[in-house]
Image (cartoon, rainbow, N blue to C red):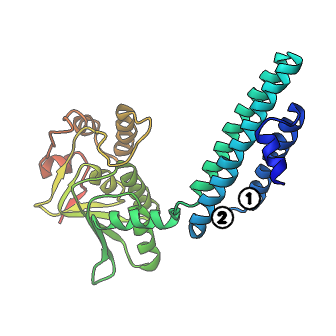
Amino acid sequence: MMRYLLNHWRGQQSLAWSFWVNLVAVRVCLFLLQDVLLAREGVSLVDAEAFTYLAVFILHALLLIWQVVGVVRAGDNHFATNHNMAFLWGSQLGSVVFFFLSAAYALEAVQLTFPTVDEQVAFDKISADRRLNYKVSVLDDHSILLINGSIELGMTQVVKESFINNADISTVQLNSGGGNIYEARGLAKLFADNDIATHVDTQCASACTLAFIGGVRRTASKHAEFGFHQYKVDADYTILATDVAKEQQHDKALFLAAGVSDFFVNSIYSHEASAMWWPSMQELLNAKVVHEVR
């Protein structure tokens, strides 16, 4: 066995044997073996890190060096005897191809030693972090659901579950400085689909007003404040292909469909994103944003 290994290393075997048997056949067998061993979905080598690194070093580094060096030396000897450049170049090109393939297989094995993040666990953590920014609670008489805080992704589902678990809810009271307009749209649709009234006792600004407009009956206290402004992209996560003007047009239609006056709707988006517009309660009543003060 040692003599065979030395003969290949020194290039003393034929180029055909060194290339097709010692390099190609052995590499293909190793690739297939690795594919079979790692084919199972979710396979992890975290608990076999040391063994994996050792196997990668021996099979995809030391063994590959032995194979390539033997092929190169056999090629040189073949050329010295037959003066055929085609076979020499072909064997060298093949060696390069198998080098990169081996690197890819080595990388695959090494990556499986890294701890994987459970996507559901990660999602649950993100959702829990967002839940810290708002609170959804049912008031004592069980007919009012209070939403207090930022409108965050996932809030619609939380509110929907509250409706399912509390059939007596007929009004949602909002106290929010704004948040995610996509989630606010979801809330507005949820309120409309379930014949829910909306009420503001203190403040409802930015995206909150979009959720508020989904109420079938919209009321507010005489001290309530409503803030409106143009949209802007302001998120701690990537939002792809967002057209602010298009989003504003979309929500203009929602306000109009809810019975809000044209003049008021156009005024909403005439104010810069950094300059909140706080219309008077009388303006809100005249525009049908608020139906009743109580």
Q: Is residue 83 above or below residue 279?
A: above
Task: State which quarter of the image contains the C terminus.
Answer: bottom left
Task: State which quarter of the image contains the N terminus.
Answer: bottom right
Gap between marks 2 and 1, in whole Å?
8 Å
Q: Is residue 229 above or below residue 148?
A: above
Residue 200 horizontal side relative to residue 255, left or right:
left
Residue 143: % across, % down: 33, 77
In the picture, the disc for residue 39 is 1
Residue drawn at point x = 22 percent, y = 36 percent: 267
Q: Is residue 6 above or below residue 266?
A: below
Residue 221 horizontal side relative to residue 143, left or right:
left
Residue drawn at point x = 34 percent, y = 46 percent: 259
Asked which secondary structure carries label 1, the reply is loop
In the picture, the disc for residue 223 is none
Residue 31 horizontal side relative to residue 180, left or right:
right
Which amino acid type is marked by label 1? Ala
Asked which secondary structure carries label 2, the reply is loop
Question: Residue 64 lies in what quarter of the image?
Answer: top right
Which amino acid type is marked by label 2? Val
Q: Residues within 10 Å of mark 2 (few under 14, many from 20)?
A: few
Q: Nearer the viewer, residue 225 or 291?
A: 225
Q: Residues within 10 Å of mark 1 (few under 14, many from 20)?
A: few
Q: Is residue 206 above or below residue 243?
A: below
Instruction: Give the residue number, with chain letter if any, for mark 2.
Output: 43
Question: Residue 83 lies in what quarter of the image?
Answer: top right
Residue 134: % across, % down: 28, 66
Q: Nearer the viewer, residue 210 or 71?
A: 71
Cβ–Cβ below 8 Å for labels 2 and 1?
Answer: yes
Residue drawn at point x = 57 percent, y = 54 percent: 111
